[in-house]
Amino acid sequence: MKYTGYLIVATTILIIASALILLSSTKPPLTVKDSKLETATATENVSAMKTITIEELASAPDNYPGQVGVVGTVLTVNKSEKIFTLGCSDACIKVPVEYDGSMPVVNKEVVVIGELKKGADNRYVFQAKEVKVK
């Protein structure tokens, strides 16, 4: 009878420790996206992400907050500044893209994945996390 208190305390500690282990080994946190719960991961699944054209992005930039895929043609590349210009084939639209990876080739159609940001000068710059040649 005198060990009953110790058994209750030990059992409680085991239950709490098991719950903590179970919680720490489950899936990453859930996020709300497009009215569905999805598992948050380090890289987004490109096929599930909304992909738009450069024309759509330029016509209504505020309609695309957050991460998005944008299809366009590489018009210019500045390797030293880690920036290239994305546009349409007739160069009527030009959006600067900041990217830390290897620069794409001029005149190639690409999909850039990232976010459109407005700078201090009120100009938009697309901050790419990934660039894929189409």
Image (tube, helix red, strand yellow):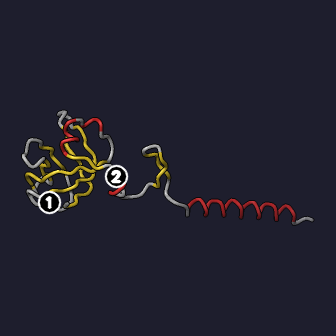
Eyeballing the image, is 34 above or below 12? above
**In which quadrant is the N terminus drawn?**
bottom right
Q: Amino acid at mark 1?
A: Pro
The answer for how far apart the CA atoms under marks 2 and 1 are is 21 Å
Apparent side of residue 113 relative to residue 13 in the rendered image (left or right): left
Kindly identify which residue carries mark 1: 104
Residue at (12, 58) in percent of width and height:
108
- For disc 2, the marked residue is 49
Question: Which residue shows up at 22% across the image and 41% down it?
Answer: 56
Answer with the quarter of the image where residue 16 lies: bottom right
Where residue 49 sits in the image (x, y, percent)?
34, 52
Q: Nearer the viewer, residue 41 or 33?
A: 33
Q: Nearer the viewer, residue 5 or 80?
A: 80
Could you classify mark 1 by the number of other residues whose Cα lies within 10 Å: few (under 14), some (14-19), or many (20 or more)? many
Q: Position of residue 36 (x, y in %)?
A: 48, 47
Element at label 2 = loop
Q: Residue at x 8, y 41 (%)?
A: 92
User: Does 109 sit left or right of 60 as displayed?
Assistant: left
Image quadrant in which you'd find residue 24: bottom right
